[in-house]
Image (spheres, helix red, strand yellow):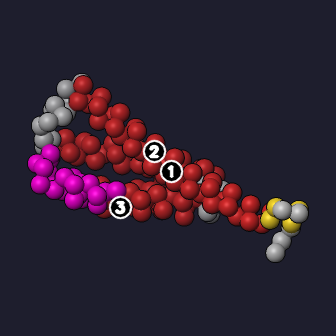
Amino acid sequence: MGLTCDWIEWDWFVEHEMNRKSIWAVVVGVIVIVVVTTVVDIALHVAGVFPPMDQPIDDGLALLATSYRIVISVGGAWLTARLAPDQPMKHAVILGAVGVVLGLVGVVATWNLGLGPRWYPISLAVLAIPQCWAGGRLYEMQSGAR
């Protein structure tokens, strides 16, 4: 069963440590993306670029929000790939899959609330995997990993 030392199964420990590092890499990516996009949203509301929180955004502001979310998500996926113990692209794409799920929750939760154009939450769900793939690919190109 691998190396043992009386009561420690080292193979089990190594495997589970890798799993923890993998989960942590994806969780950090999610947290960074959510926190940074929220901070940018709040800053744009405070600066008067976005209307007050209780008012909807129009197509132009939704496009602005989509644009910076893409950049932030690519950065979050790069970070996830960087933190991954192995297979950085796999971790980045898993982050994208988490983004799809969260995006679909957003579509369902906001569909009839009139917070902005309906294409906006749909675009966040649709773009999650491609932008995370781009972040993973950027990391691979910079690190020479594959």
Mark 3 to mark 1 CA distance (whole Å): 14 Å
Mark 3 to mark 2 CA distance (whole Å): 15 Å
Mark 1 to mark 2 CA distance (whole Å): 6 Å
- Name which residue type carries label 3: Val
In the image, what residue occupies the spot 11% across and 54% down?
Answer: 112
- Would residue 56 be counted in the magenta stretch? no
Image quarter for residue 2?
bottom right
Circle 3/circle 1 CB separation < 8 Å: no
Q: Furthest residue to the top?
A: 47
Q: Which stretch is magenta?
A: 100-123
Quarter holding the C terminus?
A: bottom right
In the image, what residue occupies the spot 48% across and 62% down?
Answer: 94
Give the image location of residue 54, x and y in percent: 14, 36
Quarter holding the N terminus?
A: bottom right
Judging by the rendered image, the residue that carries numbered circle 2 is 31
Q: Would residue 50 appear left or right of 131 to someone viewing this image?
A: left
The disc placed on residue 130 is none
Within 10 Å of disc 1 (Cα), the crowding (few <14, some 14-19, many 20+) is: some
Circle 1/circle 2 CB separation < 8 Å: yes
- Would residue 116 be counted in the magenta stretch? yes
Q: At numbered mark 2, what does the secondary structure look like: helix, strand or loop? A: helix
Q: Would residue 92 appear left or right of 145 to someone viewing this image?
A: left
In the image, what residue occupies the spot 69% across and 57% down?
Answer: 17
Judging by the rendered image, the residue that carries numbered circle 1 is 27
Q: At numbered mark 3, what does the secondary structure look like: helix, strand or loop? A: helix
Residue nearer the viewer, 143 or 125: 125
Judging by the rendered image, the residue that carries numbered circle 3 is 101
In the image, what residue occupies the spot 36% across and 49% down?
Answer: 70
Residue nearer the viewer, 7 or 83: 7
